[in-house]
Image (spheres, rainbow, N blue to C red):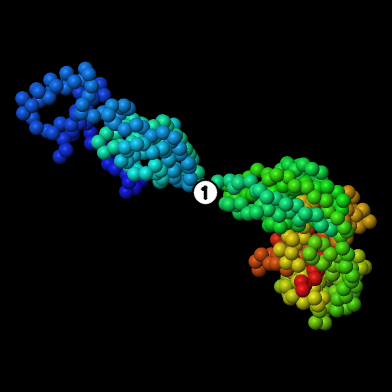
Amino acid sequence: MERSSLQVKEREEEGKTSGEGRMESRGRGCWRRRTGRRRSTQVAVVALASLLLSAVSCEWGSDPNTPGGNGPAAPGSLGASAGDGHVVVTWGAVSGAASYFVYYAAGATVSKTGTRAVATGTTYDVTGLTNGTQYAFAVSSYDGTDESGLSGVATATPTGGVGVPGTPGGVEAKGGNGSVTVSWPSVSGATGYNVYWSQGTAVTTVSSNRVANAVSPAMIGGLSNGTEYAFAVSAVNTAGESGLSGVKTARPGGAVATGDTVRDIEGNVYHTVTIGTQVWMAENLKTTKYRDGTAIALVTDSAAWAELTTPAYCWYNNDIANKATYGALYNWYAVNTGKLAPAGWHVPSDTEWVTLTNYLGGRDVAGGKLKEAGTAHWEYPNEAATNSTGFSALPGGYRVSNGAFYGIGSYGNWWSASATDASFSWGRRMYHTYANVYRNDYYVQNGFSVRCVRDRD
């Protein structure tokens, strides 16, 4: 490790002469400087004087490794704050000190044999340390002639990266129609936030619902009007997650708004539902034509479907009787034309799906609020399904990229308009056995249902 400009060379070995002479011990704690002249009479006189004076006091200064003597006092109030590969050492000023020596060594103890650096103030940043290794630090003061003994020892362990962010403060929760909006100020060092919520007045990270990667203000939807809910926020970064903020409670009021209807190019009618700030179709798309009137290719043969690199649609099991309830299944090439939805509408992006599930309390619970309730179409147990949003998600199954059909009654699968690469695109899936909405990237050859969302004004 290369020393900083403030670091100084180690003191020369005892007994080695230099242009300034050398330090010579004369009794306990007593030192004097020898000039290097060797005339016997001078040595004899000095030796005799040294023996006489050592019984009373030491006139030549103090041992730089021994506290006391005529040197300055040792520094107090020592502190050590660890960072990424470095530790900042601080101490209290000493009267008469011209500079300070900072000693440090790996482990829990340090002496004047440790690595030494020179500081002129009361703080020093020791750099080039190994993350995860404990270091001990001590400081002495120097008045230009003598050095004090060492201060007390402080230890610190450098760590890589940033520390865990602080706990958010100033959290607010405001009720809306079937929703609560939670807001909070930013926290230094945080790269994201989690919102935890529960019915009642208490929140924990273990048993409460969680909205991950939340952005303030975050709207939690699909809640029961008039019911009290509790909310708390944590801050996160690569080092970990903070503790929870103080709990805020709020009661939603009003009802989830339901829209009118929309027609596609063929005249198929779809009911709509407003969920938060978005207006969605409440039924799967059924059209066999783009909104410009161009026909979409109907492909029934499994082998032909598996080889497709162009837009196509089909009915589940190639049975048009499934059209009225479940709508059509489209490959992603049809979605990617940008012409599949009626005018004024579009296939939702991955981000718009995230907005929907976050509004409903997160992906872990959103499925229950989106799925049609009961077992008329969903297989038992249709876990947690309440359809509190009016979205009426149905298990229309899907067509696998090899052309086979699978999952009607068990799964519902919906495309987003967002590709991950040339072969995959983001989609959503809901199951009869879970309350979740699952986000995955799927082969673009798969045949999925499509829900449309209205363009923003």
Q: Is residue 325 left or right of residue 81?
A: right
Indicate the quadrant containing the C terminus: top left, top right, bottom left or bottom right.
Answer: bottom right
Residue nearest the observer in this picture, 381 or 222:
222
The image position of residue 426, as x and y in percent, is 71, 63
211 vs 42, nearest the viewer: 42
Residue 232 spot, x, y in % from top left? 72, 47
Is 229 situated above or below 27?
A: below
- Name the outermost residue toward the bottom: 293
Q: Residue at x 12, y 24 (%)?
A: 46
Q: In the picture provided, is 325 more to the left or to the right than 353?
A: right
Q: Residue at x 45, y 46 (%)?
A: 85
Q: Which residue is mark 1?
A: 161
Q: Position of residue 330 (x, y in %)?
A: 79, 69
Image check: 19 left or right of 176?
Answer: left
Residue pushed farthest front? 95
> In the image shown, does 420 or 70 lie closer to the viewer?
70
User: Of helix, strand and loop, which one carries label 1?
Assistant: loop
Residue type marked 1 = Gly
* Circle 1 Cα neighbour tier, 10 Å, few/some/many (<14 / 14–19 / ≥20): few
* Snapshot quadrant of residue 377: bottom right
Q: Looking at the picture, does residue 218 appear above or below residue 105?
A: below
- The image position of residue 454, as x and y in percent, is 80, 71
Q: Is residue 99 above or below residue 255?
A: above
